[in-house]
Amino acid sequence: MFEKVTIESELRKMLALDFNCNADDFDKKENIIVVPKELPGRREYTPKKAFFSMVTMGRNVVINAPEEMHEWLVNWGKGRESIWLFEHHNLMELEGELAKYGKRLWQSHHMFLPKARMEDVDALVERQKTDAALEIRWFEQEDIQPLYGREEFPNALCDCFKPERPDVLAVGVVQEGQIIGLAGCSADTKLFWQIGIDVLPEWRGKGIATMLVRLLKNECFRRGAIPFYGTSLSNLGSWHVALGSGFYPAWVEIATREG
């Protein structure tokens, strides 16, 4: 089992690869501005690194941007507490500067790490199964292929098999042969597996999402991986699932959308 301090230390290492910086840069008071670089082992959500990206773990911000933006970014951050650079009025100023380069910001991602403990979810699972005659079904990587293309699972799984971050495991709730909820995880790195969840609309609000995410989180730990979870600022339902499943807010990132 990973201790909390170990999980956060490993997160710093992962973000350092993503943002071309040092792991201890996230503990500094001053902001760090460096050029983007495609380092081996980074998370690959796009074929190329974004023109601009920014991340915080709560102390400072680390920014990736081309050198021609660095002077403007230094002045932009002066006199402003780092964490507030993600506020809308500051992002609007940034958006105006990015427009000069033909770029626009995409959505911010609010990311969660697990509390460093396994959870006993047996009683929760048995209650759910008994209350609605539900079946829990596990899907290994080779079982996931037939699930691609299903419109009801846009968050639990990638849209297709992606070798750079393959879906490696999923767990679903089945009633009368129909999957009514599915949680899946992609190996975004060898160590960090990202969990996503989908529940059919008519089954939401019954605790199914929380149960599945907790089950999958436990299994990630058993397999030697660190699970993490991401959502958007206004998706309060997803926030409740993350918090109810034993996750806590750990970092926030934003980038330009390419293409």
Image (spheres, grey):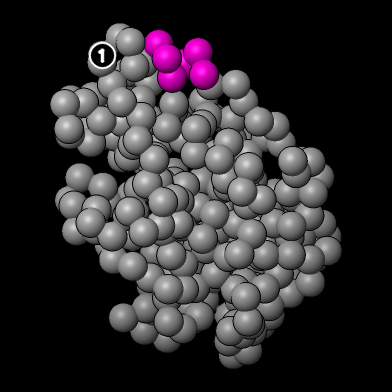
Query: Predominant secondary structure in magenta?
Result: helix
Q: Quadrant of residue 92?
A: bottom left
Q: Which residues are magenta?
A: 122-127
Q: Which residue is mark 1?
A: 132
Q: Residue at x 46, y 35 (%)?
A: 213
Figure quadrant of the C terminus:
bottom left
Q: Nearer the viewer, residue 226 or 50?
A: 226
Q: Nearer the viewer, residue 11 or 192?
A: 192
Q: Residue at x 62, y 25 (%)?
A: 119
| Residue 180 appears in view | yes
| Residue 60 appears in view | no
Position in image of residue 76 (x %, y %): 62, 69
Placement of 196 over or under 245, stated as above or below: below
Q: Secondary structure at mark 1?
A: helix
What amino acid type should be assigned to the residue bearing mark 1? Ala
Position in image of residue 65 (x %, y %): 58, 80
Q: Residue at x 47, y 47 (%)?
A: 195
Residue 118 belongs to the span the image colors magenta: no
